[in-house]
Amino acid sequence: MHCLVFPGQGVQRRGMGEGLFERYPRETAAASELLGYPVARLCRDDPGDRLADTRYAQPAVFLVNALSWLDLERDGRRYDYFAGHSLGEFNALVAAGVLDLMDGLALVRRRAELMAGVTGGAMIAVVGLDSARIETTLRAAGFNLVHVANRNSDKQVTVAGDRRQLALAAKALRGPGVRVLPVHVSGPFHTPAMAAAGRAFADVLRTQEFRAGHTPVMSSVTGTEFDPGRAVQLLGTQISRPVEWVRTVRALRAAGVARFDEVNGTTLTAFIARIAARPTEEHV
């Protein structure tokens, strides 16, 4: 079986989407009207370093992901599953027929606004430790305002929370063979600090119709197939719960997926290559 995966915030870069906006002028014009600014120019030139701002980065990544999918669909590519990392899950739902493209973009715009409204936190990527070791270290040190945010691969985990505690946690986590890298986002995404934003987004989601779709999507919140009937809960809590990418990839493999393609870069492809076929004891 064959799965297409969509990355989330963090893959944005000046010049992304080159050629796509010209091939899809109708969708690009509709997106620019909905967003209130010329999205092609944002991606091409990044005026004022706006792609570093969550409010602009998320809609831009979503649209480039979506147009990349349209390119694949035009070429006759078909997939047995879709999946997305955080923001990318909205692209997976569009590709699967659960949402229309512009409805997805409208949701992403509001999601980005709500997430950008939570400040005072930060994120770091820890490379070289599994999530169980990281959580043990955080608990032992009493860092109650720092949490695992993304389980990206067996030894690549994102941690987020209060800036002061996070700086101390970074020192505690460093060691031989372990790298700690800053993640350039505006807040402590996918942690309990985002709960109010998640509840506000759930109110937005209740106004949206989610169709059954034609292709299964694997949820990055639960690592099980996305149930459109639970869309409000799943997508609302996604903001404040960890991205379970390791669990998602293992579930896809268990369902028979042997091949993964990715749009808009190779970030998730690299993570997938570093996820073991079977979990070790600390991942159970």
Image (cartoon, rainbow, N blue to C red):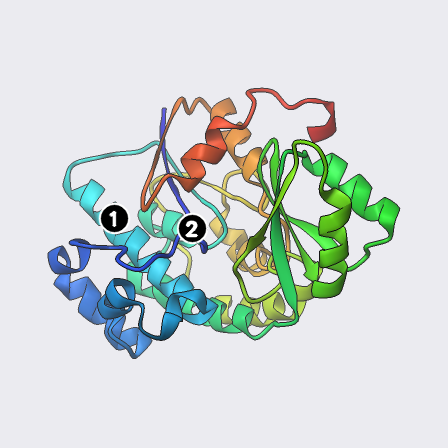
* C-alpha separation, residue under disc 2 versus residue under disc 1: 12 Å
Q: Position of residue 30 (x, y in %)?
A: 22, 70
Seen in the image, is 16 located left or right of residue 169? Answer: left
Find disc 2 in the rendering and name its residue: 88
Seen in the image, is 84 located left or right of residue 126? Answer: left
Residue 284 seen in render: no
> Which quadrant of the structure image shows residue 276?
top right
The 10 Å Cα crowd at callout 2, few under 14, some 14 to 19, many 20 or more, is many
At label 1, which amino acid type do we have?
Answer: Ser
Viewer-closest of 42 and 175: 175
Q: Is residue 262 above or below residue 258?
A: below
Q: Position of residue 103 (x, y in %)?
A: 35, 65
Please tell me which of labels 2 and 1 falls first in the chain: 1
Q: Is residue 235 above or below residue 31?
A: above
Q: Position of residue 95 (x, y in %)?
A: 32, 47
Viewer-closest of 65 and 251: 65
Residue at image location 74% in from the left, 36% down from the top: 132
Find disc 1 in the rendering and name its residue: 68
Q: Secondary structure at mark 1?
A: helix
Residue at image location 77% in from the left, 55% down from the top: 168
> Which quadrant of the structure image shows residue 33?
bottom left
**Residue furthest out toward the front:** 176
